[in-house]
Amino acid sequence: MHGFDPKWKDPTDYILGITQAIWEERGIDTLDHYYAPDIVVRSPASVVVGNQGIKAATMATLAEFPDRELLGEDVIWCDAPGGFLSSHRLISTATHTHSGVYGAASGQRFAYRILADCYCSEDQVKDEWLVRDQGAIVAQMGVEPKQFAAELIHKEGGTEQCVKPMTPANDVTGPYQSRGNQHPLGQQLAGILGDLMQGAFHRIPSLYDRAAQLEYPNGQSAQGWRDADSFWMGLRAAFPDAEFKIEHQIGLEEEQMPPRAAVRWSLNGLHSGWGRFGTPTGAPVYIMGITQAEFGPGGLRREWSLIDETAIWKQILLHTG
């Protein structure tokens, strides 16, 4: 029904299994089977088309971090035409053993979260949207996201030659065109995010459990109403007129798991306000975010929201020079 080899018992088993095979079992060649030749992988940092580019990036990462592990925390999924769409939340641990993208080998031990939406059909991943907490990585290096973005622009050849962050202008249309499912929990999470982006911060006490556990960019762990207000207010204040859009939503209830949801969303507009990104610059910025949540009787009780702050700063710096 879900379009994968019967050795996988369900979509969760499939996603966790192929992730382990590719990364931890060093099966780079399995990408030729598990990733479609013309796959589109979108991250805030770039848009990559084709499996060969994915294989090259995978090897570069494993060369720099040879002991990398990917610890799957959850897979929230829904049926999709010809297969399924998964929203995979994981923590990556790795030691910076060799020199690479993150500079000279430091021996630093990293831990950071990733959220990835994958459309899977015919035993292959055919479309992907991935948000890596790059801010958490650079924070563990002792570097601010803005500084890392500036150094990356320089390393990549300057403002004209550097890899451009993902925007609607350079996005590529892939085979997955669905918007998720109509489960009430997905609608609930989409509604919460919509309320916050409309400025209804007074609703946080009625939407969130008072003791909600919150995981935000740059490896920030937070708790409760005040911290939820602080993160979302700071983000919206920096882009007060940007268009907020729900791109995809899933609600899921399974045995032995809490009720949960996953929403992929975007902000598209100008850096025109004082907020999380400092002095307004007027820079055009596109933000791809993914949020997962678990619900209880008091409302949203656990939240994981990710954006890549280094990619946002890169867009700001490319505008300001």
Image (cartoon, helix red, strand yellow):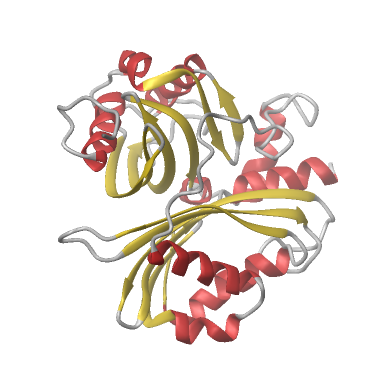
Residue 144 screen position, x and y as percent = 60, 52
For the point 28% across and 18% down, the residue is 27
State whether residue 91 is above or below residue 228. above
Q: Is residue 288 left or right of residue 109?
A: right
For the point 80% across and 27% down, the residue is 160
Residue 92 screen position, x and y as percent = 34, 42
On the image, which quarter does residue 167 sit in?
top right
Residue 153 screen position, x and y as percent = 70, 33
Residue 63 visible in the snapshot: yes
Front residue (pair 209, 26): 209
State whether residue 300 is above or below residue 170. below
Q: Is residue 137 left or right of residue 314?
A: left
On the image, which quarter does residue 28 sit in?
top left
For the point 69% across and 48% down, the residue is 286
Q: Quadrant of the C terminus?
A: top right
Q: Is residue 188 left or right of residue 69?
A: right
Q: Quadrant of the N terminus?
A: top left
